[in-house]
Amino acid sequence: MPFTLPSSLKVIGDAAFLTCELTEIIIPEGVTAIEDSTFCNCFYLESVTIPQGVTKIDDFAFISCDALTEITIPDGVTEIGKKAFFSCDLLKSVVISDSVVFIGEEAFGENNNLTITYKGNTYTKDNTSDLYALFS
């Protein structure tokens, strides 16, 4: 059963769910930012729904969320912080909307089986540096 955050929530603060054991989280439309380390080390988190109202996914937000398999970064997100999705062992697919204008250092590092789609281009572990180069 998914855990749905309250609709009155605007920002999910630093380390709010650090090492939680939830498997599915639905973030409500009113949220605009996912701050540093919000879901850090949530090893069992398999699914997260990020709404279009979010504009920033901060540094380390989902680092080591080992059970995540796919993420869609929706329209409206402009920034993905450094190591935001670093070392998510099962992460295989990330689709990033064209609204993203900044991706931090190693945002998707240490994800060996990952395919990232951004602005019609596909990136894998072999050419992820090309993706990061777009923002340096």
Image (spheres, helix red, strand yellow):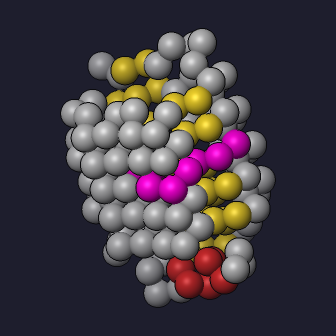
Residue found at the far front of this picture: 14
In the depicted structure, whether residue 6 falls above or below residue 127: above
Q: Position of residue 83 (x, y in %)?
A: 46, 64
Which residue sits at x=77%, y=53%?
A: 99
Q: Quadrant of the N terminus?
A: top left
Q: Quadrant of residue 112?
A: bottom left
Question: Is 20 on the left-hand or right-hand side of 136?
Answer: left
Q: Quadrant of the C terminus?
A: bottom right
Q: Which span is picked out in magenta?
A: 55-62
- Does residue 46 belong to the magenta stretch? no
In the depicted structure, whether residue 69 falls above or below residue 35: below
Which residue sits at x=33%, y=64%?
A: 87
Q: Main secondary structure of the magenta part?
A: loop
Q: Position of residue 105 (x, y in %)?
A: 54, 73
Residue 67 visible in the current orientation: no
Q: Position of residue 86 (x, y in %)?
A: 40, 64
Q: Position of residue 54 (x, y in %)?
A: 66, 37
Which residue sits at x=31%, y=56%?
A: 64
Which residue sits at x=28%, y=49%?
A: 41
